[in-house]
Image (cartoon, rainbow, N blue to C red):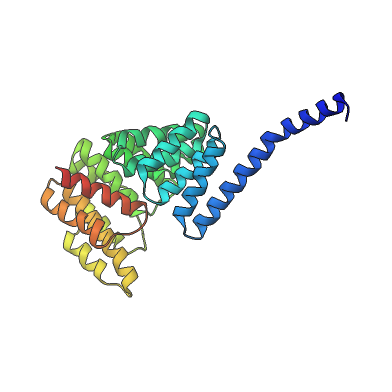
Amino acid sequence: MNYRAATVLCASLLCALPLLAQDKVDELLNQAQSAQRNGNIAEALILAAKAIEAAPKNPQCYYVRGRLYAEDRQHAKAVADFDQALVLEPRGAEIYQLRGFEQFKLGRFKESCADFDKFLQFMPKKAPHHWQRGISCYYAGRYDDGRKQFELHQTVNPNDVENAAWHFLCVARSAGLAAARASLLPIKNDARVPMMEIYSLFGGKAKPDDVLAAAKRASDSAASNRQLFYAHLYVGLFYDVSGNEKLARKHITQAAEEYKVDDYMGEVARVHAELLKSK
């Protein structure tokens, strides 16, 4: 092989190296996500770490591992990976969204709001659907922003008692219970038990015991657990905004521990219970 041919071959190989490295990273990330789907988070995290080691400047690697940490409830580690992903890709809208969720779960409410606000700068059409932002605003003390968020959500979800309840809570914190009751968002029918009883409670037409009694009328244990979760959570939130900290702690702790559910509202109950316990 002459010198010119050897030079061309070496140049070709050097150009191929980044592609080969990217192929390796893609394979590791695909394997990590496959392990995640199979329920093996520990293996998925090991594979994602190998991808980061192979490509420490690739934001996708930190994004994937951050999501794995979030699923494994390692919220601080998830935030750290999303931080790094955003350093490398500051226009990653979904990363701000996911970090906002994790910040909330860590009780970092102002940071959660900031991330959700940033997400909506990139994705403004998502604003009416972003009820999670309203909840973060409530806990961050941004009551007027929370009120506006729930009013906006009402335009796309007009029969959600939970949305009306959080709107009530924001108004009650900023203007008092009477003003909150007077501005209660109209709900015609939320078919979930015991949502309409919760709506009546916030509207001054029912008692906490009415909500709890309705929640106990369930056809099976799975439905009963979720109904009792919502009953205790919203009864607790009502007591909290009404100034009865003892009963608020009792019912929100029951929602978070005795009737806990594995979704975002379950995290809301857990976070609020921790706040009450820390007082």
**On-image quarter of the N terminus:** top right
Against 81, residue 43 (above or below) is: below
**Residue at 21% over, 59% down:** 254
In this picture, residue 277 sits left or right of residue 116:
left
Against 257, residue 63 (above or below) is: above
Which residue is nearer to you in this view: 175 or 104? 104
Q: Where is residue 96 in the image (x, y as percent from the top left)?
A: 45, 36
Against 41, residue 136 (above or below) is: above
**On-image quarter of the C terminus:** top left
Which residue is nearer to you in this view: 169 or 271? 271
Which residue is nearer to you in this view: 126 or 65? 65
Q: In this rendering, does residue 55 appear at all?
A: yes
Q: How many labels does the image show?
A: 0
Q: In this rendering, does residue 123 appear at all?
A: no
For residue 252, what is the image quadrant?
bottom left
Against 181, residue 218 (above or below) is: below
Which residue is nearer to you in this view: 209 or 177? 209
| Residue lying at the far front of the rendered structure | 1
**Residue at 27% over, 55% down:** 199
For residue 117, what is the image quadrant?
top left
**Residue at 39% over, 38% down:** 79
Q: Where is residue 138 in the image (x, y as percent from the top left)?
A: 28, 39
Q: Position of residue 143 (x, y in %)?
A: 28, 36
Q: Position of residue 42 (x, y in %)?
A: 44, 53
**Residue at 16% over, 43% down:** 278
| Residue lying at the far right of the rendered structure | 2
In this picture, residue 273 sits left or right of residue 137:
left
